[in-house]
Image (cartoon, rainbow, N blue to C red):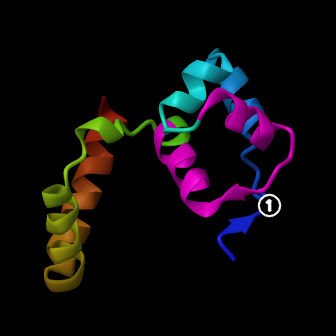
Protein backbone atom coordinates (compact mmCIF):
# COMPACT_ATOMS: atom_id res chain seq x y z
CA UNK A 1 0.00 0.00 0.00
CA UNK A 2 1.22 3.50 -0.75
CA UNK A 3 -0.45 5.13 2.24
CA UNK A 4 0.48 4.30 5.78
CA UNK A 5 -0.44 5.95 9.00
CA UNK A 6 2.32 8.07 10.49
CA UNK A 7 3.59 5.83 13.26
CA UNK A 8 6.97 7.37 13.84
CA UNK A 9 7.68 10.03 16.40
CA UNK A 10 7.46 12.90 13.90
CA UNK A 11 4.03 14.48 14.14
CA UNK A 12 3.71 16.99 11.29
CA UNK A 13 1.73 19.45 13.40
CA UNK A 14 4.40 19.41 16.13
CA UNK A 15 7.18 19.87 13.58
CA UNK A 16 5.34 22.76 11.94
CA UNK A 17 4.68 24.49 15.24
CA UNK A 18 8.29 24.08 16.38
CA UNK A 19 9.38 25.75 13.14
CA UNK A 20 6.90 28.57 13.68
CA UNK A 21 5.28 28.15 10.27
CA UNK A 22 1.64 28.34 9.31
CA UNK A 23 0.15 25.47 7.33
CA UNK A 24 0.53 27.22 3.98
CA UNK A 25 4.23 27.94 4.53
CA UNK A 26 4.98 24.48 5.89
CA UNK A 27 3.13 22.30 3.40
CA UNK A 28 3.86 24.33 0.26
CA UNK A 29 7.60 23.62 0.67
CA UNK A 30 6.90 19.97 -0.09
CA UNK A 31 4.21 20.49 -2.73
CA UNK A 32 1.16 19.80 -0.56
CA UNK A 33 -1.80 22.15 -0.41
CA UNK A 34 -2.77 23.75 2.88
CA UNK A 35 -6.02 21.78 2.97
CA UNK A 36 -4.18 18.51 2.25
CA UNK A 37 -1.66 19.27 4.99
CA UNK A 38 -4.49 20.06 7.39
CA UNK A 39 -5.96 16.62 6.73
CA UNK A 40 -2.59 14.96 7.42
CA UNK A 41 -2.28 16.91 10.65
CA UNK A 42 -5.74 15.69 11.63
CA UNK A 43 -4.73 12.05 11.27
CA UNK A 44 -5.34 11.16 7.64
CA UNK A 45 -2.91 8.59 6.26
CA UNK A 46 0.14 10.26 4.77
CA UNK A 47 1.70 8.59 1.70
CA UNK A 48 5.30 7.53 2.19
CA UNK A 49 6.68 10.00 -0.42
CA UNK A 50 5.03 12.88 1.44
CA UNK A 51 6.42 11.63 4.78
CA UNK A 52 9.90 11.37 3.28
CA UNK A 53 9.71 14.87 1.78
CA UNK A 54 8.51 16.20 5.13
CA UNK A 55 11.47 14.52 6.85
CA UNK A 56 14.02 15.77 4.31
CA UNK A 57 12.78 19.34 4.15
CA UNK A 58 11.58 20.07 7.68
CA UNK A 59 13.53 17.64 9.88
CA UNK A 60 16.82 17.24 8.00
CA UNK A 61 16.58 20.84 6.71
CA UNK A 62 17.58 19.90 3.14
CA UNK A 63 16.82 22.48 0.48
CA UNK A 64 15.35 20.21 -2.17
CA UNK A 65 15.32 23.11 -4.65
CA UNK A 66 19.10 22.76 -4.84
CA UNK A 67 19.17 19.00 -5.49
CA UNK A 68 19.82 17.81 -8.99
CA UNK A 69 19.47 14.35 -10.52
CA UNK A 70 23.20 14.30 -11.28
CA UNK A 71 23.94 14.81 -7.56
CA UNK A 72 21.88 11.74 -6.75
CA UNK A 73 23.62 9.80 -9.53
CA UNK A 74 27.02 10.63 -8.01
CA UNK A 75 25.85 9.56 -4.55
CA UNK A 76 24.50 6.26 -5.88
CA UNK A 77 27.74 5.63 -7.80
CA UNK A 78 29.86 6.31 -4.72
CA UNK A 79 27.69 4.07 -2.55
CA UNK A 80 27.78 1.14 -4.95
CA UNK A 81 31.20 1.38 -6.64
CA UNK A 82 33.35 3.43 -4.25
CA UNK A 83 31.93 2.51 -0.85
CA UNK A 84 35.10 3.27 1.11
CA UNK A 85 35.41 6.70 -0.49
CA UNK A 86 31.72 7.31 0.24
CA UNK A 87 32.23 6.39 3.92
CA UNK A 88 35.28 8.66 4.16
CA UNK A 89 33.46 11.60 2.56
CA UNK A 90 30.42 11.07 4.75
CA UNK A 91 32.59 11.03 7.88
CA UNK A 92 34.39 14.21 6.78
CA UNK A 93 31.10 15.97 6.09
CA UNK A 94 29.76 15.05 9.53
CA UNK A 95 32.94 16.27 11.22
CA UNK A 96 32.81 19.56 9.33
CA UNK A 97 29.15 20.06 10.24
CA UNK A 98 29.87 19.44 13.94
CA UNK A 99 32.75 21.89 13.89
CA UNK A 100 30.59 24.64 12.37
**Is 82 left, or right, of 46 in this rendering?**
left
Judge the density around disc 1: few (<14), some (14-19), many (≥20) Cα neighbours within 10 Å. Answer: few
**Image position, residue 82 (x, y; %):** 14, 80
In front here: 62 or 50? 50
Q: Residue at x 68, y 32 (%)?
A: 15
**Image position, residue 60 (x, y; %):** 48, 42
In front here: 55 or 38? 38
Tell me which corner region of the image, top left, top right, bottom left or bottom right, holds residue 12.
top right
**Is 95 left, or right, of 48 in this rendering?**
left
87 to 19, vertically: above or below: below
Q: Residue at x 38, y 39 (%)?
A: 62
User: Which part of the image, by quadrant, shows the C terminus?
Assistant: top left
- Which portion, as a residue range, is magenta? 33-57
87 to 55, vertically: above or below: below
Per the image, is 52 magenta?
A: yes
Magenta stretch, main secondary structure, is helix
Per the image, is 44 magenta?
A: yes
29 to 64, vertically: above or below: above
In front here: 89 or 49? 49
Tell me which corner region of the image, top left, top right, bottom left or bottom right, holds residue 16.
top right
**Image position, residue 99 (x, y; %):** 31, 34
18 to 10, vertically: above or below: above
Q: Residue at x 49, y 38 (%)?
A: 31
Callout count: 1
Q: Give the residue at mark 1.
A: 5
Q: Residue furthest bottom?
A: 81
**Is 91 left, or right, of 7 in this rendering?**
left
User: Which part of the image, by quadrant, shows the N terminus?
Assistant: bottom right
Q: Residue at x 56, y 44 (%)?
A: 54
Amino acid sequence: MNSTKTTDKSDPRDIRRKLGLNQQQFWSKIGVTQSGGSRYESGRNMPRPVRELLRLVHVEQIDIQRLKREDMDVIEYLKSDESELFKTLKKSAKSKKKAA
